[in-house]
Amino acid sequence: MSIIVIGMLDEREEALKVIKNRIERRGHRSILIDVSIGTGAIASSLKADVNCEDIARMGGGTIEQIKGMLAKEREKATSMVAEGLTKKVTEFYQAGELQGVIAIAGMTGTFISLTAMKSLPFGVPKLLISSVTAMPAYANKLADYFGLRDITVMHSVVDTVGLNPLVKTLAVNGANAICGMVEGWEPIKKEKKPSVALTEFGFCDKGAHYVRELLDKDYDIISFHATGLGDRAAVDLVSQGFFEAFIDLVPASFSEFLFGGNRASGPNRLDAALHTSIPYILAPCGFDMISCGPIDRRDKGDPLWISRKLAERKILIQDAIRVQARTSVEEMETIAKATAEKLNQYSNKNLVKFIIPQKGFSSLSVEGGALYDPIADKAFFEALRKYLNPEIKIVMVDTNINTPEFAQAIVKALQVGFESIKV
C-alpha cells in the first residue's frame, strides 16, 4: 500500500522531493507521478515512478502532442493529462495499492489533480496543496470537485515553485497531514441500521424533522442541504451505493436547472437511483419557486428576470441575497412533464413513489404563504398524473409538507418499498 504524490516535476521538483522524502521517513511507500506538460523550464533530476509520457499515453496522446497543443488548445491538452492521471490513479486504487494521495500544484496542476482525486471514493485520504483554491473567480468550477468529494485543501498562500522556507514548511506539513490521515484511516463502517439519504431545506424543515423523528430508531438518516451542491452530493453517493433508500423531499434543483435558478444542479438530478434497487421516495418541495436572488438582479435587467417575467409574480425577498419567485401554471406543468420523463426511465418503477402534499409543497405555498397558488400546484399534480407511468404510484396527502401526517405518508411509502424488495 502506498501514498501517491502528484505534481509537475519541471516546475515543483524541490517541493515534491520534500513531500516524497517525508512520506518515506514516516515508513510509507511513495509513488511519484509526474504530470509535467512542458510549461516549466527545469530539467528534473528526480525520477518519477510514473512519468509524464506514460500519463499522456493513457490520456490518448503523446507528451509531444500535448506540448504542441498548449498554445491554441490548452484546455484539451490538460484534459488529456487529467484523463490519463485519473486512469492511472484508478488503476492503483483498484489494484489495492493506494492508501492516500497528495498533490502540490498551481492553476493547471490543480485541475489536473482534482480530476483524479474526484474519481476516488468517499473516505480515501486526499490532500491538495494549491495556491489557487481561494480565488473567487474559480469558486464555481472548484465547487464541482469539492462539493462532491472529501478533498482536503491546504491553501498555500504563496506560489509553490522553488523551495524557500515557506514552501518547505507547506510541503512538510502536507506530507505529515496525508501520512496522519493514512495512519489513522478506518474504513467506513456501515451501521446495522439501513442508511437513508434525505434532502431538505428551510422551507420544509419541520416536515424533514418529523420524518427523521419517525425513522431515527430503525434507520440511519443522512441529510443533505438541497441548495444545488448538496443535491449533487446526494445523487453522487446514492449512485455509489452508500444508501439503502433515498427520500428526496426537495428535488427542486432539477426545476432550477430547467429555468436557470440559483440552485440548479444539472440535468441528471433525478437519476440518483436510476440504476439501483432501492426505494426512491419523492416530494415536490421547491418546485413551487425559482431561486432568483440577489434582488439587485431585478433592477439590472437580468435575463432570468426578464425572460420569466419574475417581477410580475409573487415574490419572497428573504434578504438582499435570497429571493424566491413563484413558479407559474405553465412552469409547473413543464416541471411535471420533465420529472415524469425522468422517472419513467427507472426499471424498478415499483420502488419509486411520489408523495404530494395537496395543501402546500413548502412553507411558502401554504394558504397565507408568500407564494400561495393552489391553481399552480394543482396543475403540477394533474400533469404528473398525465405523464407519469402508472406503475409509479402517486400518493395524494390532504395536508402540507410540514406536518406529521405528511411525514407519516413518506415513512409508509418507504416501508412499502422495503417490503417490495424482500418479496
Image (tube, helix red, strand yellow):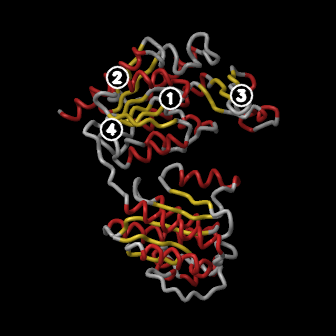
**Mark 2 vs 3, N-terminal side:** 2
For the residue carrying disc 1, how many other residues have a C-alpha within 10 Å: few (<14), some (14-19), or many (20+)?
A: many
Q: Position of residue 176 (x, y in %)?
A: 48, 66
Q: Are marks 2 and 1 in contact (CB under 8 Å)?
A: no
Q: Position of residue 39 (x, y in %)?
A: 65, 79
Name the residue carrying label 2.
Answer: 214
Q: Residue at x 37, y 67 (%)?
A: 98
Name the residue carrying label 4.
Answer: 195
- In this rendering, the count of numbered labels is 4
Using the image as rendered, state which of residue 358 and residue 242 is in the foreground: 242
**Mark 1 vs 4, N-terminal side:** 4
* Left or right of residue 203: residue 409: left
For the residue carrying disc 2, how many other residues have a C-alpha within 10 Å: few (<14), some (14-19), or many (20+)?
A: some
Using the image as rendered, state which of residue 212 and residue 397 is in the foreground: 212
Q: Amino acid at mark 2?
A: Leu
Q: Secondary structure at mark 2?
A: helix
**Mark 1 vs 3, N-terminal side:** 3
Name the residue carrying label 3.
Answer: 319
In the image, which disc is placed on residue 336?
1
Q: Amino acid at mark 1?
A: Ala
Q: Amino acid at mark 3?
A: Asp
Q: Residue at x 60, y 82 (%)?
A: 10
Q: Are marks 4 and 3 in contact (CB under 8 Å)?
A: no
* Left or right of residue 345: residue 78: right
Q: Secondary structure at mark 3?
A: loop
